[in-house]
Structures are given as structure tokens and as C-alpha cells.
Image (cartoon, coloured by chain):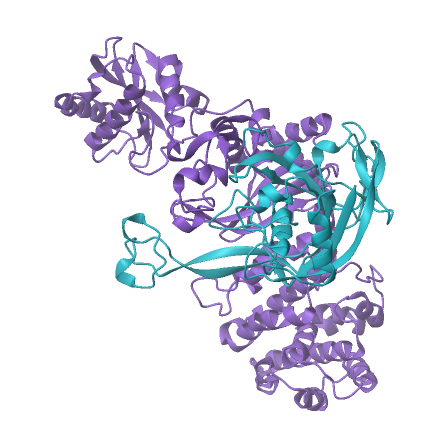
Chain colours: A cyan, B purple
Amino acid sequence: MKVVVFDLWGDYGHFRRFFTTSSPLTYSFPPPTAVRGIVGAILGLDKDEYLVATADLAVGVRVLAAVKRVRWGQNLIFTKGSGDKFDPTLFRDRKGDQNKTLRTQVKYEYLKAPRFRLYVGGDAVLLDELAALLQEHRTHYTVSLGLSELLADFAYVGTYTARQLPPGTYDLSTVFPAEVLDAEHGLQEALHPGIKLAKERVAIYLAPDRTPLLYQDVVLDMGGRPVRVTVKEPVYQLDSEEVVYLWPPASTRIPASR
Amino acid sequence: MLRALRVLGVILGGPLVYDPVKADQVVALEFDAQGRYLEAKIYPFNEQDLPRYLYKNAKGSNPPTLTPTLLLNRTSIQKSLKNARNAYRKLRDLNPSLPDLELTNEALWPVMADHIAQVIEGLRKRERVLLTVRIDGQWMGEREDIRQALLAKFREEGRESVALGTCAICGEEKEVSGDISPFKFYTIDKPGYVVGGFDKTLAYKAFPLCYDCRDLIQRGRQHVEANLTFAFAPSIRYLLIPDFIFGAEAVRRDVMDILIEDREQRQQRLHTLSRQEVRRITADEEDILDLLSQERDVMTFHFLFMSRQQSREAIDLYVQDVYPSRLRALLQAKSTVDRILRLPREDGTWREYDFTYTILYRFFSKADPNKRNPDLLRHFYDLVDRTFRVAPVSTRYLIPFLMLQIRHDVVTPDRRDQGLYRWTILDALAALLFVQLTTQKEVLMSDQNPTTLEDFLNSLPALDSDLKKGLFLLGALTERLLRVQSQERGNAPFWKSLKSLKMTETDLKGLLPKVRNKLQEYDRFRGGEDMLFQKASAYFAQSPSPWRMSVDELNFYFALGMGLFPKVAQFIYTKKEEVEA
């Protein structure tokens, strides 16, 4: 399988955890669904198209810089208009709550100076186009780290051939789902000083109508180091010797009915 | 986090259909099997009987409960009867086979109220009374039909955004809703919170949760709130949520045994640990961090600091995946700080020091101690987060906050004259040391029991340059002078020369000979003072000029010397009587 690899970084990032709205927390890494969105932005795919267009791609994420978080309050426009309708007005008399609130302060959590390496694998023609655009440092839509205000820069790393490795013990550079770990020895070699594993539950696949189809607990090292684990499912080794976990193409998980 | 709570919910035996409530007495309205009202009876409240009372809070505030069990409004009993009637009516709508109680007959309320008033007569005003109904001699919780109706009631929440989908927590495909989050930091009351289209009915796409998981998470949350909520600093509490990266069954059981142990047993274990001098890191008496820090690294903790405004919940800080080893490291840092800062008393004993996060809170909560509300909490949470994650913090960032409080004490005559500023300085040093020890990968600590002044200066990680040591010694010498002045004349006019601790490099350089002169005037410039003077001069001479330190920093290291004078005195005075004042 061909794998296009590129780095993505910025000053701040925010990938909202699904169970928060009024105090948004962020994931430590862009979930696979966000990676598809980023690929879609580079290729110029509309938000209604990219999920279908990238359904045949396998994706992986590596955390390159230790995860740092910062929090601050942000003043948002209070959007509840009269009759509870959406109305982002700043006319006080049109506000829908008793106090006629114009703004609401929300405590946001952001990733500080995040840096990721993204892996996009498959055999689609799309990949050639992606690699070409990345090499020229061109995109159709501006790439961001979760929110449109958090602009991202990117750099092409290379295009590699990935070879499937059988289940075994490897130094995995990327984040991986907890369920690929061997039930008995999964983390036996990972737990040594310096490695700080974290587990975050994320949506892995979305149907074209954006309904989540699969959630997984994803494991990562907060310092961005490779983790030595024993896996019961195949992983990939690139020409660069790096061993990575790639989520299988969405098309393999989405029922034909969708 | 939610999944961890769900696991806890499962281990605890599944969802609870009732909420915990505290009361002193229970008044039951007795009905026969056909629902005819008989009488009011009073029973002593028993926590073990909670499942029978079936008290369950409603989501909003009106009606107060989902069942006719509620806290009695003793001044207006009929209001409680009305609420009970409403709650029962709603249950009966869901299960029409429930007996038609005469509770719905408003004409009977004065009689019932009268009976209730009679049975509670003589109770003290403060006693809380739970009002409930009993049908045919059975408590609410003993009747399957009522329990079923209540379960059906739970399923009514969030119907607006229900669909068939994949539950975000258990991953099963079943009926999910997008509006039943057990935590209120997920709300969809504002259109902007509903991802994609501002359409509430589609909210399930953002956070699809099944009702079973919701109930289990709630059970886990209840347990955590009752047993694993700790005070961190005044008015700041956190929930401690245990989690497992991998979830090995044996470990999970071990840890859960500890967590589910009843309070009494746990306190006993804490007691044993405290005998081994493993001290607590937070201000809470029942803190179990010590205990948990002994557990194995495959488990992690989530620290959730939440604030509540009415029904809304906001996350102030969420520290995820803290390892037990990290807790151990924090405890070790605390004991190091405690050891460095214990001060010798004149009688040869030691005054122990006890560092807690409350001390950090003191410096990082209010810019002006006279303010009513904390305005620096953002910095406090940030520091807490950094100490948990070993993220470096610059000393230059900390010192202005520490100086703010020290200066406040120095310029407030009451606090200055009572010597309270010395404890503030000590606390400031403790805060600095703790943050240094917990946020820097390596902090050099030398000699645990220094025997000379040099060793002592070298043992303080805060004094890592000649200039800092010089300022420290000058501070100690000045404190000596202030004490002498207070002793000789009852006040210490030399304070004026210290310019409310806003001295510049020039001021400090001029201060050294000034202190010496003053001490000579009082005939107290003897061996010990001379030694301090000489050493301070030597350190200053070795420091490159200009000093390149902010006014805050210069004064901070100077103040440290003032606060730690008793420690310095140990090394410069050989005879006990010379340490006077």
C-alpha cells in the first residue's frame, strides 16, 4: 500500500471532545475523522463530499511534540434569540433570555504548539494528487487545527510503501486503538519510566450523513514517543522502517445501505 | 472519563433508581391497596432504607422529585402534598395500573396536612423530614409497578433527539439520544452547541448516548461525588475518577476494593499511613491520594475540577491520565518542602511545616487579598495542571505573585508588627520550592542536614546564584536588625528603609552598610552579624554588575532571607542566648 506522509503544526489546536459543549475540552491529537477533513481541505473537497471521497483511505496519526494544553475563557456571542431561535445578533432587545445577554464566556481548552505527522494510505488516484499538492505546499481550502481560527502549516515528508506486519511486539510510532492490544501482554513492555500513556475515546468513522459509526479508546504517549506494544492485529511498516497503525478504510466499515 | 464512570457504575452493581438523600425522620401517608387514605405515620430515617424510600431528583427544579417522596416543607405542608400529587400523577400516566391514590383528592389535603402536623409535632426545627407514601403497607421502592414506572420515566428525557445509533460509550447499536449527558458541561440549549445545522433533533450525531450507559455513568458519578470528591483549596473541589489504560481484571478489582471500601475502613488505613508519615497533599482530612499513590501504574486518575452555577456545570480544569507514580512524586516533593522549611525553636525542638495546595491558592487566587472574589484562579489552575504534568514554570513568572502577598503583609501595619510577614515569606518559599520540585525534571538538592551556612545556602534550590545568596544573607541580616530594634525600642523604624520591599539594585547596595551601621549603633554587630555581612559582601562582589534582575526578584530573595532568619541563626550563633528575639 502507498502511504503519503506529511507533518501538520500550528500555534494552537482544538479538536473538541464529543461529550463537551459549554466547556469544550480538546483531544490530544486529530481524530481520524479530522484527518479526513484535513485531506479534504487540501484536495478541495466540499464538506459534503470528503467523507465519501476519502472512504477508501487508511489513516494514521503520530504525535510529534509532547502534548501541552492551555485554557482560557473566550467571549462568544450569545446565540439564543427570542423564541429560542438561533440569532447571533448584538441587538440586546432581540436576545432570548431574561438578562438579555449579549455574550457568553466559555472556557476553552487548546493544544499548545501541537505538531502531528499524518499518514494517508491507499491506492486511490487521490493520493498522487495529495502528494503533488503537499510537495508544492498548496491547498484548495486553508488547513486548520480543528477550528477555522487555528491555522495550520504543513510540510510533505514523503511517499512510502507500507508492508503489513503480522501480530507481534513493535515500537508503534502512531496512536492506536486499545482494542488492537494483545489481551495478556499488550502493554507489558510499554510500562517503563518516561512513557505516559493516555486513553481518549474518539469517533473513528462517520457515515456520509455524519452519524458516528464506531467509537474506540485510542492510546497515545503524551510525550509523543513510540510505544512498545504487543498487538493482535496487523500493523504496517513503512520504507522508513517506522511501524505505524493505520485505521482501515472507512468503506470497509460503512454498511452499503449508508 | 465517561467510560471510566460507566465501568465504576457496572462494578457498583448497576444503576440506582433512587438518589441519596439525608433526613432525620420519614413521614409516610398510608394508603390501602385501593388507594384510600388511612393515616400519617412517622418512622426514623435510616440510610439503609434509601432503596425503599425511592427518592429521585427531577432534572429541573419543578417538580422537585420524580416520585412522591420529597423533603417536607414544614411551614407549608399542602405545597409538599401538591408536589407529591404531581409526581405521582406523572408516574401513573406512565403506568395506569398503579392504584388511584386519594392523594389526588385536594379536598383531603387539609386532613392529611393536619395528620402530618400532628406526627411531626415536637420535632426540632432543624430536623429534616422526608414525606413519602406507603401503599398497602409497602414502601414505594418495594413495589415493582412503581419501580417500572420510574424506569420508564427515566427514558423520557431527551426524547427530542432520539434515534437508532451507535452509543458513544458502549459502542452498541441501540436507541440513543443526544440530550441526556450526565454532566451539564454538555448542553445543547444554545443553537450554536448543536453541531451541524443547529437542529436539536440531530444532536444525537454529536454525542449519541444510550439510556443504559447514561444510568450507569450516573451511578458512577454519584459514587465519585459521594466518596471521591476532595477539597483542594478553599472553595475548590475536584472529582477523582479512577481509570485503567488497559483494564486488567485483577488490578481493576484490587483498586475497586479500595475505592468501594466503606469510609470507616478507609479512614483506618489512612490512619496507618499517616503514622508512617506519608502526609496528605491536599487540605482534606479524608483524602485518599496517599492510598491511591501506592497502586500500580496501569491505572490512571482523572482530576475533574468543576464549578457549578445553578444547574450549569463548567470545567475549570481537567487533568487526564495522572499516574499513581506522579502522585507519589507530588507527595515526595511535599515532604521535601516540609523538611526544608521546618524551623528550629529556641528550646531546640522543631516547628514542623505542612505544605498543601491551599498555600499555592493563597498566592494565586487574588491580586488583592482584600478583594471578595478570586480573580487569579486561571493562574492557579494552570499551576496545578503544570505540577501534575511536569510542565516547566519559570521562576520569573511566579515571583511577582509571591511578592504581591509578601508586600501586602509588609505594608499592613498589623500584619507586619505581629511578624505575620515571616510566615507569608515561608509560604512563598514553600510554593516556589514545590513548583520547582514538581515542574522541573531535575532540581539539584544537596545536603539533607547542612552543618554550615554554605551547605545550607547550597541546599536551597531557589538560591542558585551568588547574587541570590547575597540578597538572601542581606535579608537575614536586616531581619536581625529589625528584631533588635523591636526588642530595644518596641518598634522598628528601619522598616522605612526597606521601601515596602520595592528596593532597586542601588537601594540594596546601599542597604548593606546601612544595616551594619545601625547594628553597630545598637552594639549588636558581633561575630554572627559580621559573618553574615562578610559573606553577603563576598557574594555581591562575585556577582556580575549590573545585577540583571527585576525589582520583584531582588526583593523576593531579600525577603526569603528575612523569613528564614531562624534557620540562618542556627549556623551563625553558637550560644543559645544570642538567638534571642
For the image shown, how many numbered marks are present on the structure? 0
Residue drawn at point x = 42 percent, y = 29 percent: B19
Closest to the observer: A255 or B226? A255
Percent position of residue B176, x then y: 47, 30
Q: Which residue is located at x 21 percent, y 14 percent?
A: B37
Residue B14's place in the image compared with B180, above or below, is above
Report the side of B19 relative to B507 (left or right).
left
Residue B349 visible from this viewpoint: no
Image height of B387 relative to B251, above or below: below
- Asked where in the image residue A114 lies, by quadrant, the reply is bottom right
Image quadrant containing the N terminus of chain A: top right
Percent position of residue A258, x then y? 54, 32
Q: As displayed, is residue B133 above or below residue B349?
A: above
Q: Nearer the viewer, residue B127 or B235?
A: B235
Residue pushed farthest front? A125
Vertical position of residue A51 compared to residue A135: above or below = above
* Residue B26 visible in image: yes
Residue B226 in percent (x, y) is at 51, 35
Which of the 4 image quadrants contains residue B339?
bottom right
Q: Provide residue B170's location: percent of width, then percent of height.
A: 57, 29
In the image, B240 versus A169, the foreground residue is A169
Residue at 61% across, 66% down = B423
**Residue at 60% over, 82% down:** B502
The answer to which image quadrant residue A175 occupies is top right
